[in-house]
Amino acid sequence: MAVLNTTFHHLSIFMFNRTTRKSINWLLISLCFSACLATTLLSMSAKATPKADKETEKPSLQVKGELSISPLSDTLFVHESFMQTQQYGFVGSNGLVLIDDNKAYLIDTPWSEADTIKLVSWIENQGFTLAASVSTHSHEDRTAGVDYLNRIGVTTYASEHTNKLLKQAGKPTTTNSFKAGQFDFVESKAEVYFVGAGHTVDNLVVWFPQSKLLYGGCLVKSLGSKSLGYYGEADLDAWPFSIKQLQTQFTDTDRVLPGHGKMGDKQLLSHTISLLEQHAEQH
């Protein structure tokens, strides 16, 4: 009987081991198959990823049409706002923010009140107080935010001629005005000049002596400009002489910022004269 029990015991172990080995074998086969399948899928996914990323990736550049603010130095920033125009399509407009002793000074407002509000908010978020603004001529791309600035108590400036034109057009005027010629907007740091008519009869330029930057406003065209743009209120006869005055008066300028388009150097002045000559030949 003992022998029978021992035999049965060994037989049970044998059967158990055989069954277990069979189960383990199937388990190993399953695991191997799963691993191979996973590797294949990962490989296929890796090959497909670049194409998917390329098709769905979003550009890192700012969304077209949003107000942009770009530093030129620790104390000088370019703001650019945009407008959809009937004649020229989507157009950007430049202005500047100068920082001096924790106060901000605005040269030309953005092209809309909404963007002016955004710009003021940005200035305040940087820890600065907007002290004053100056508009370089009467068009909306220079003055659209004047009314808002007046309402919040910012000191606003424009030339007497510009305010006269604004009043005639039924638009808000600045709280302060100055005679054509030279106006020290920020003493020794931002000087406003009237060098002659051009894009408009009241267009001004701003000189930053410390950074040797000339802000030509709409009197100066960018190198990307292929025409004079809007010239319905221009003095085409005086315009070339006004540019030549800039060439004579600001010989040591390193950079020139136009009212629209990219910043460059003194080539922008000669390019503007070339466009005026081209326009005269065609008309």
Image: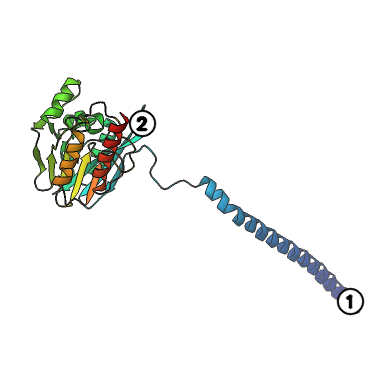
The quarter of the rendered structure image containing the N terminus is bottom right
Dot 1: within a 10 Å radius of its alpha carbon, few (fewer than 14), some, or many (20 or more) residues? few
Q: From the top left corner, tell me how far across and down residue 142 is, in percent.
A: 23, 33
Q: Which label is found at residue 88?
A: 2
Q: From the top left corner, tell me how far across and down residue 88 is, in percent.
A: 36, 31
Q: Evaluate if marks 2 and 1 touch, with contact meaning CB atoms under 8 Å apart.
A: no
x 36%, y 37%: residue: 65
Give amino acid for label 1. Thr
Q: From the top left corner, tell me how far across and down residue 138 is, in percent.
A: 20, 29
Of 40 and 71, the residue lying toward us: 71
Give the left or right position of residue 156, taking residue 58 as reference: left
The quarter of the rendered structure image containing the C terminus is top left
Give amino acid for label 2. Tyr
Q: What colouring style does the render use? A: rainbow
Q: Is residue 246 above or below residue 153?
A: below
x 71%, y 63%: residue: 31
* Structural distance between the alpha carbons of marks 2 and 1: 101 Å
Q: Which label is found at residue 7?
A: 1
Dot 2: within a 10 Å radius of its alpha carbon, few (fewer than 14), some, or many (20 or more) residues? few
Q: From the top left corner, tell me how far across and down residue 256 is, in percent.
A: 23, 46
Q: In which quarter of the image is residue 32?
A: bottom right
Give the left or right position of residue 264, taking residue 170 as reference: right
Q: In which quarter of the image is residue 171?
A: top left
Give the left or right position of residue 22, taking residue 181 as reference: right
Q: Which label is found at residue 124?
A: none
The residue positioned farthest toward the bottom in the image shown:
3
Residue 13 visible, this angle? yes
Instruction: Tell me which label, 2 or 1, sits earlier in the chain.
Output: 1
